[in-house]
Image (spheres, rainbow, N blue to C red):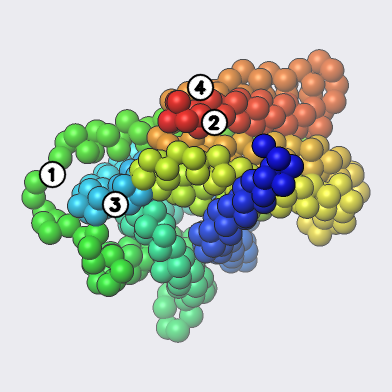
Amino acid sequence: MTAARVLHHRRINWLRWCIEARLTFKLGLPIAFGMVGQMMLGIADTAMIARVGVLPLAAGALVNTVAHIPLVVGMGMLAAISIRTAHSYGANRPTDVAEWLRHGLLLGALAGLFSGVSLTWLGNHLHRLGQPADVVAAADAYLLLFGWSLLPALISHSAKQVCEALNDPWPPMLILLGGVLLNIFLNWVLIFGRLGAPALGLEGAGIATILARVAMMIASILYVLSAERLRKFRPVNWLSGWSLRRLKDLFQLGFPVAIQHLMEVGAFVFGAIMMGWISADAMAAHQIAVTCAATAFIIALSVGLAVSVRVGHAWGARMFGRLRKIAYGGLSMGVGAMSLCAILFFLGGRMIGGWFVESEPVIQLVAALLIVAGFFQIADGTQVVMISALRGIGDVRVPTAIAALAYWVIALPVAYVFAFPLGYGAVGIWIGLAAGLGTAAIGLTWRFVIRSRPASA
């Protein structure tokens, strides 16, 4: 091959890569907006509940902590809807898309029902978690309301998964942001007793949450039922002819994803517990640094979700030559954005810490933790894009094993050793978390390289 032909071939590959990256960005942008909206809701909820008092804030924090587990598991389970819908869409099988739509909504309802029942049961056992009695008493009604709000929330999420898999992400994003604004307005009315409503405090926040999520569910279902763009993907018969095989397939595909979510979240939760073994300053600095890292992570996660859908389209269409172009194009965007966040953490750690607290020891510790966070930003961006690409081809079992190794065999033991026997304290815990994320990034990249080979595909 002549030099001119080699150059031409490279130019064509570069143009194809740019096209794939642009399409991934186009799909990922509204997903990112929706996630930012969810984050804003969490901040607004916390700020508004805090104005009522310390006790309601502590009770709300307890509920959010325990309710996060079934929410994470449920959303992981529902990831299977996006994967199967993307495969059928890529293969141009609209009838199958319609079946994944209605079976996905049913799975979302079942996951929400399980979440509501489990959190209702947990409400009778909160005192077993060793929390102060007054906090447990204050959390009782809020836990019940928040727990059952997961039913409409997970149904809405099911519809959102389908729309995103059909390259239609903007309407779900607008519905989500509308729900966020409604929730904030209802908080204002019901927490503080505005517009003639009684001031219900924390219980008002729970009522606001469930009302806003019901409204989002209704809006999501109405969109699915009425949108012209989705007309050919709607089932002819909604209520009969259910397939146990399809539900089983969704469960078998989604359950490992749920376990992946649980293991990663669990590792960071246990890291926070170890911070409590050090000092209150360590806990405060950890919370600030985790908030910053999680905010940056939204960018890479949004890219990853878009990569998962687009890889699923290519897999369903049996266009295996596009798999790596899509995945690596997304990887370059995710890692590039996380690298910019890393530079910000390196240079502005003290400034960021000062935004949250005035305590000099905490600010210094935040700056130290953000230096470690800066190093694992690239690993975090890599692992989330690669695990998303693997989900796009339906590969979930081996990535689950890699996640177990990375977070529970590497991250937590290394964190403990560096924090306590070696005496690095809070920084040692974050070194362990960084080691786990690095292991996940290497393992998942290796797995994708193997699975995206034309012979393997």
Q: Residue 258 versus residue 165: which sits nearer the camera?
A: 165
Q: Position of residue 65 (x, y in %)?
A: 53, 43
At label 2, the amino acid type is Phe
Is residue 88 in sight in this rendering? Answer: yes
Residue type (three-letter) at the residue carrying disc 3: Asn
Q: Is residue 182 above or below residue 454?
A: below
Q: Nearer the viewer, mark 2 or mark 4?
A: 2
Of tags 2 and 1, which is closer to the observer?
2
Mark 2 or mark 4, earlier in chain: 4
Name the foreground residue: 302 vs 197: 302
Foreground of the two, 151 or 18: 18
Q: Examine the rendered structure and indicate whether residue 176 appears above or below residue 250.
A: below
Q: For residue 428, what is the image quadrant?
A: top right
Q: Which residue is mark 4?
A: 401
Report the residue marked by disc 2: 448
- For the residues labelled 2 and 1, the Cα–Cα distance comes to 34 Å
State the residue at coordinates (23%, 48%): 96
At x 27%, y 34%, the residue is: 249
Side (left or right) of 177 relative to 432: left
User: Mark 3 and 2 residues: CB-CB less than 8 Å, in contact?
Assistant: no
Q: Are marks 2 and 1 in contact (CB under 8 Å)?
A: no
Q: Which residue is mark 3?
A: 92
For marks 2 and 1 on the same chain, the one whose residue lies earlier in the sequence: 1
Q: Quadrant of the N terminus?
A: top right
Secondary structure of the residue carrying numbered label 3: loop
Q: Secondary structure under badge 2?
A: helix
Q: Nearer the viewer, mark 3 or mark 2?
A: 3
Q: Residues within 10 Å of mark 3 (few under 14, many from 20)?
A: some
Measure the alpha-carbon separation of dots 3 and 4.
Answer: 32 Å
Residue 186 appears in view = no
Q: Residues within 10 Å of mark 1 (few under 14, many from 20)?
A: some
Mark 1, residue position: 242
